Image (spheres, rainbow, N blue to C red):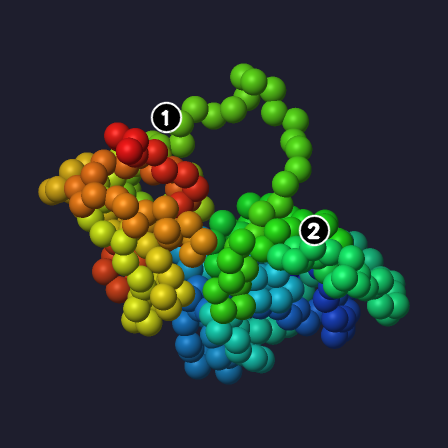
């Protein structure tokens, strides 16, 4: 997508993304594009009659719904019109130009997708819709996988409109292709704080000193209200704080931890710097105690 025919790049659309044709000029097609963007990657503006501007340093994904499938990648500085809001998400529109040869007429069927009777599934199992479902590293985070249409996922926990799910399957992974834990742990909390956007989604292995098990207050906007997390320090009692977000169904596992106990935590970075305190937040993948009880 370009501002003018052969002009500045505004965004890159994924193959299969649907756009509305507004006009033509030579070998270019003017289109209207709509989608949803994580609200923290946008700022208000009144420039050139627009409502919002993409403020994330590396740009941001455009999705087909809140936490939905990625349909494009928006460049930093892109101006947008606001259409609607939901918690954490904003629906936007932009008119721009695309090379006509990259477009094809859409022939999407209006026939409804076959439904799956609830009685045919065990409790706690959900089915991805007709467009499939994106699986994110954290609420509003990067896409780490995708469930195909009608794939079954196990619901582990719910927080508002988000669900933590498990999807099991097989992938080809020869023994010599798996990364070592050392490779996963090269990022430090200090590096994550310096580059919050670039560190988001990174897998880390950190030795942390447990302080307490907490529940997030409403003011901690990087968490769901009431979400459990471990308050820890990296590298000992004088090291920087790290928050470890814990799935609600696993919080009981950490009731017996002893303050100042050492843990080896494998997690995925939710943000390198929380909005309230600038502290790194990682989502728990696994944990190993220095001394098992």
Image quadrant containing the N terminus: bottom right
Q: Nearer the viewer, residue 8 or 286?
A: 286
| Disc marking residue 174 | none
The outermost residue toward the top is 176
Image quadrant containing the C terminus: top left
Q: Residues within 10 Å of mark 1 (few under 14, many from 20)?
A: few
- Please give left or right for residue 248 compared with residue 92 in the image: left
Q: Nearer the viewer, residue 234 or 168?
A: 168
Q: Residues within 10 Å of mark 2 (few under 14, many from 20)?
A: some
- The reply to whether callout 1 and callout 2 are in contact (CB within 8 Å) is no
| Disc marking residue 182 | 1
Residue at 62%, 45% (x, y): give it.
Answer: 167
- Quadrant in the rendering for residue 29: bottom right
The x and y percentages for residue 96 are: 64, 68
Q: Is residue 75 visible?
A: no
How far apart are labels 1 and 2 at the CA level?
Answer: 33 Å
Residue at 40%, 65% (x, y): give it.
Answer: 224
Q: Is residue 79 above or below residue 284?
A: below
- Quadrant in the rendering for residue 227: bottom left
Q: Is residue 292 visible?
A: yes
Residue position for label 2: 152
Please tell me whether mark 1 sits on a helix, a strand or a loop.
helix
The x and y percentages for residue 28 are: 74, 62
Mark 1 or 2, nearer chain start: 2
- Quadrant in the rendering for residue 285: top left
Please tell me whether mark 2 sits on a helix, a strand or a loop.
strand
Q: Nearer the viewer, residue 95 or 249?
A: 249
The x and y percentages for residue 111 are: 88, 68
């Amino acid at each position: 997508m370009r501002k003018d025919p052969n002009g500045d790049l505004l965004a890159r659309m994924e193959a299969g993304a649907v756009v509305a044709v507004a006009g033509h000029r030579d070998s270019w097609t003017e289109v209207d594009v709509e989608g949803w963007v994580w609200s923290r990657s946008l700022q208000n503006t009144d420039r050139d009659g627009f409502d919002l501007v993409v403020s994330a340093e590396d740009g941001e994904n455009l999705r087909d719904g809140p936490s939905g499938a990625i349909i494009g990648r928006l460049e930093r500085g892109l101006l947008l019109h606001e259409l609607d809001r939901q918690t954490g998400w904003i629906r936007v529109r932009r008119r721009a130009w695309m090379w006509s040869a990259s477009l094809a007429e859409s022939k999407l069927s209006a026939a409804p997708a076959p439904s799956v009777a609830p009685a045919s599934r065990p409790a706690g199992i959900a089915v991805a819709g007709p467009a499939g479902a994106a699986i994110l590293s954290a609420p509003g985070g990067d896409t780490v996988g995708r469930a195909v249409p009608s794939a079954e996922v196990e619901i582990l926990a719910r927080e508002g409109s988000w669900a933590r799910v498990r999807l099991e399957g097989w992938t080809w992974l020869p023994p010599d292709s798996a990364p070592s834990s050392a490779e996963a742990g090269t990022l430090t909390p200090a590096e994550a704080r310096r580059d919050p956007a670039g560190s988001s989604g990174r897998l880390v292995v950190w030795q942390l000193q447990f302080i307490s098990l907490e529940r997030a207050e409403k003011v901690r906007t990087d968490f769901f209200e009431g979400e459990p997390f471990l308050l820890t320090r990296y590298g000992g009692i004088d090291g920087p704080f790290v928050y470890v977000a814990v799935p609600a169904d696993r919080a009981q596992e950490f009731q017996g931890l002893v303050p100042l106990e050492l843990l080896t935590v494998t997690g995925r970075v939710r943000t390198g710097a929380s909005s309230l305190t600038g502290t790194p937040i990682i989502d728990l993948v696994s944990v190993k105690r220095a001394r098992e009880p």
